[in-house]
Image: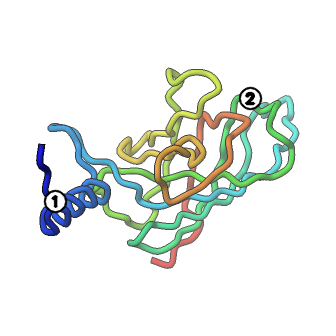
Amino acid sequence: MNMRWTLPGVARSSAMAMALVLFPIAAPGEQAIWELGTLTCDVAPEAQPTPNEPGQGRAALCRFRPGDKGVEETYIGTFQFIGQEKLSSASRTIILVVKAPVSKKVTAALLQQTYSADVSTGARRQSPLVGAKDSSLVLQSAAAQAEQPSMALGQTLEAIIMIAELRLASSPA
């Protein structure tokens, strides 16, 4: 078989491959998902639970950095974990990738809502956190997608986040 490569043919193939990487494709009826940015959260040490308030979660201060659109916002929140006995009592940083349909616009207070994990994902694995009010917004641990290209890097979590609640603290917008 005689194969000939021409410069225009190679350039066209390279351009098509690059377009597939830059512009996600969804199946008919589905929306393409895109990384909007990263949410970096400094999680405070766990407070000692009291008999009246057992397991209220851990306070967090988070910074949302949109990829290429929008301005950085600060959120305060609460994270509830399972497997917390393995989580050190020291504060730690968690990096989450914010994903949404390509059509989603970055607006002020976009992330303000409660997110919960899908319990059917299985033990010892962090599932994406899905928004309760706007389920098109998903927070995914940067460590959970280490095999995939991403805007963020993270460390493997020793505990699994089950619920995250975020409230806007400040936004320059």
Left or right: 30 as drawn, with respect to 21: left
Left or right: 137 as drawn, with respect to 51: left
Closer to us: 154 or 133: 154
Q: Residues within 10 Å of mark 2 (few under 14, many from 20)?
A: few
Q: Classify 82 as above or below 107.
A: above
Specify which label sits upstream in the sequence, 2 or 1: 1
Name the amino acid, label 1.
Trp
Q: Secondary structure at mark 1?
A: loop
Name the amino acid, label 2.
Gly
**Are the residues flagged by discs 2 and 1 in contact, CB closer than 8 Å?**
no
Q: What is the x, y in percent for residue 56?
A: 73, 37
Q: Residues within 10 Å of mark 1 (few under 14, many from 20)?
A: few
Q: Classify 40 as above or below 73.
A: above
Q: Secondary structure at mark 2?
A: loop
Distance of label 2 from label 1 (alpha carbons): 56 Å
Residue shown at 41%/72% (left/top)? Answer: 70
Residue shown at 46%/66% (left/top)? Answer: 66
Q: What is the x, y in percent for residue 50?
A: 86, 34
Q: What is the x, y in percent for residue 36?
A: 41, 59
Nearer the observer, disc 2 or disc 1? 1
Residue 160 found in image quarter: top right
Residue shown at 11%/48% (left/top)? Answer: 2
The numbered dot on residue 83 is 2
Q: Quadrant of the N terminus?
A: top left
Which residue lies under the disc numbered 1?
5
Q: Quadrant of the C terminus?
A: bottom left
Left or right: 115 as drawn, with respect to 87: left
Residue 18 found in image quarter: bottom left
